[in-house]
Image: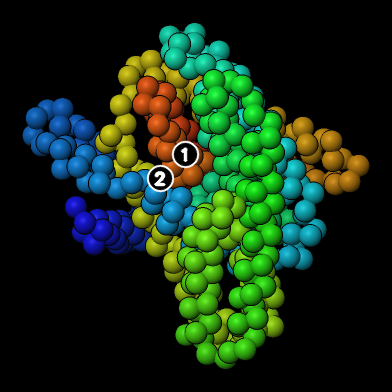
Amino acid sequence: MNLFDISAILLTACALGSFINYKWIKLPSSISLLLLAMGLGLLGILLTKIGLVSDNYVREFLSSINFQETVFHGMLSFILFAGGLQISIKDLKQSHFPVITTATVSTLISTIIIGIVFFELANFLGFTQVTLLYAFLFGAILSPTDPIAVLSIMKKMRLSKHIETIIVGEALFNDGIAIVIFLSILEMIKARGVADFSYVSYLLLMEIGGGVLFGLAIGWIANQFLLRVDAYQIELFITLAVATGGYALAERLHFSAPLAMVIAGIIIGNYGRYHAMSDQTRRYIDSFWEMINEVLNAVLFFLIGLEMMVINATYTLTILGLACILIALVARFISIAIPLTLLKHFYQPQPKTLIILTWGGLRAALSIAMVLSLEFTAIREVFLPCVYFVVVFSIAIQGLTLRRALQAIK
């Protein structure tokens, strides 16, 4: 199936789902599309079981979509850049301590906690192929909060600016950190457990440091172009060039392309928007990137829902997957509590901040893309259902109840 046919099917399905949600369901768009797609998946599984339909077409359709490529080398660049455009440097400066620590220290702590508990539980249930290093790899997959899910749901909430900045800022930055941890553990697995400190240091320097510096550079260059033109069509093309060309070049240079997009988006959103754009240009660019964000989120969440059709979860895997929901939540709570406690002399969190950050730490497409990128088939078959359980719970339950949870703890 070619790219146009795939796009036509997905966009048509998302348009119908969005219409149904607007008229009757009235849930947040991303959550409703996920639930509708899961409903279609469950219906398809039921009809297949009783022999009324064949699921070959759906399986063929889903297998023709490279989810990992779609997320990592397509949608992520646009969504992260659009997210960066919305971040205020002033708000970020006021919340820089919790944003930096939750994006780095919390991600590492969560990886370790999830890894240890998952290793013990998986081996207890008979999945002896899960070694400790593989378990830490699983921890790296589930530790980052997903910017796609967070940006989609947070903007519908009425949070304090401080809390919103922490949650969104962490989600935008910690994916780059998690990917470096993920790649470092992969390297250790390939080296049969022998840690290559020099390679890990190189990854940290090149991926994280290089991504930040590269994002600053392309953001500054884009601003210079924006200052010299007053035509919204051309200025829109410049932002598109940053989101596409900048992301592709960062990957070629082995820098963290996600971090580069966030930094470039913040630079353009704070300096380019107010010093290089007219009011008309700002309206067009903001509307364009908001629309891009909405469309890509809709397609991604619909795809996550449809993936139910190809998830092979045995009874034992279902138990492990359900347990992973609790493991991920507890690890999130502990990983946030530790750095916030250590920062108490520099940063005084608002009441209930820990609970909000724990329940608002959503996992979604990024985790699924990471697990699908694994080449180890036997391990991927164990990881994928577990990750899927956590992602669906995160979006459908945490995302759906977040507003009520906030109201209940005020």
Q: Who's the residue at 68% across and 65% down the image?
A: 216
Density class for disc 2 (Cα within 10 Å; few <14, some 14-19, many ≥20) is: some
Q: Position of residue 24 (x, y in %)?
A: 33, 56
Which disc is residue 68 wearing? 2
* Left or right: 374 as drawn, with respect to 194: left
Q: Of residues 53 and 3, which is closer to you in this image?
A: 3
> Could you tell me if the residues under marks 1 and 2 are in contact, i.e. CB atoms within 8 Å?
yes
Residue receiving disc 1: 370
* Left or right: 3 as drawn, with respect to 395: left
Q: Who's the residue at 30% across and 43% down the image?
A: 306
Mark 1 and mark 2 lie on one chain; the one further toward the N terminus is 2
Given the image, on which type of amino acid does mark 1 rest? Met
Q: Who's the residue at 69% across and 51% down the image?
A: 209
Q: Position of residue 152 (x, y in %)?
A: 50, 56
Which disc is residue 237 wearing? none
Q: Which residue extends farthest left?
A: 52
Q: Of residues 309 and 394, which is closer to you in this image?
A: 309
Given the image, on which type of amino acid does mark 2 rest? Gln
Q: Position of residue 67 (x, y in %)?
A: 36, 46
Q: Position of residue 119 (x, y in %)?
A: 54, 16
Q: Dot 1: what SS? A: helix
Residue 344 visible in the picture = yes
Q: Of residues 5 and 323, which is closer to you in this image?
A: 5
